[in-house]
Amino acid sequence: MGVTTLVAAAVFGGGWAAASAVQSPTQREAAASAPPKQPVTAAVTRGDLADTITSEATVRRAARERLALTAAEAPAVVTGTPVPAGQEVVAGHSLLEVNGRPIVAMPGAFRFYRDLEAGRSGPDVRQLQQGLTAAGFAVPADGVFGTGTERAARDLYRAIGYPAHEVADPAPAKADAGASDAESSPPTTHIVIPRAELIVMATDRAHLVTGPAVGASVDDETEIVVERGELIAVAEVPSTVGVRVRAGMTGTLTAAGKDAPMKVTRVDDSAKEGESTIELAPTAAGATVSSAAGRAFLRLDIEVVRRNSLLVPSTAVVTGGTAGGHVRKRLADGGFVRVPVDEAGQLGGQSAVVPTTRGMLQTGDLVRVD
């Protein structure tokens, strides 16, 4: 009896095992199929719906000027750079030192073409007098190098810490041939301002950009670059991008950790083949941008559809039907609810939406996009 029971159990068990290993074609297809497709969602964000470009930019002054030096003697070598790059240069200041002598900045319209001294007159003397006055050493601009001009020039050299060039006056003829040397008048001198010690810039104030370093040789081709005016931003972009930029477009410049609203003032396609130069100025009156060293970054709006709006992928907006447009917002339980919206604009695969019921759609909500 016990043996029969064991055999029956084995046969029954073997039949169950065989049945479980055999599947119909329908069962095999179901087992191999992918799991049910899950809804695809995207987060709602807030921002500007705009076509933008980003680029590195530099911050500089609006106007740039190249100042030409005059080499009076050879060899002429830079022996000092009293003004560091970025610092303001004012009329009457020594901009550079060459062969131990100062190169004095003077406002004017032309380079000085001769050395100036007492008795000379002309437009160059008048320009010198105007420069002395701008430097704080007032003298009438009558175009004649007289005692007042000489006094002002001596004061300028004294202020910048250099002796003026002294030249002995011709000895006067003796009235009495028998007079002794002890009775003769002491020799007198006057100053000469070498043209090589004057460098002309368009205004009485500017900021130094670059100049020759100590030890560099100086000739008539040597230049100093200065800037003046308000601080602006300059960006170099491919010409394929530059053709889309127009004066008046707005953007944001990030420099030294601060953001400044900017407006395009000029687009130049002629500077370099294949590139466009974009110049921008602060949009707000009195606003400035930082001139601190380091890179600046520009975000420029090419086309602005809507600012400060809720943004969703355009595929999330369902349109058509009598109910108008809507998005499907995900609920906490995994389900979805329709939120009626007005589509305020569309650009680059994104849509700006406004929920018809305030508060029904917020930043961070997930909406279905499939």
Image (cartoon, rainbow, N blue to C red):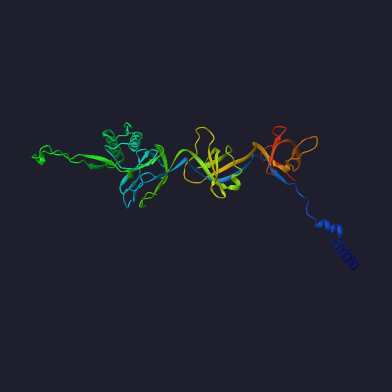
Instruction: Return the residue nearer the eye: 314 or 281.
Output: 281
Q: Does 51 sit above or below residue 137? A: below
39 left or right of 267 in image: right
Q: Does 28 sit above or below residue 274? A: below
Q: Is residue 228 visible from the viewing direction of this image?
A: yes
Instruction: Return the residue nearer the eye: 211 or 143.
Output: 143
- The extreme top residue here reads 140
Residue 64 percent location from the top left of the image: 46, 42
Task: Give the tally of numbered discs.
Answer: 0
Q: Quadrant of the N terminus?
A: bottom right
- The extreme left residue here reads 178
Residue 204 percent location from the top left of the image: 39, 37
Q: Is residue 47 visible from the viewing direction of this image?
A: no
Residue 72 percent location from the top left of the image: 32, 48
Q: What residue is at 30 percent from the left and 48 percent from the top? A: 100
Q: Quadrant of residue 321?
A: top right
Residue 123 percent location from the top left of the image: 35, 36
7 left or right of 94 in image: right
30 left or right of 247 in image: right
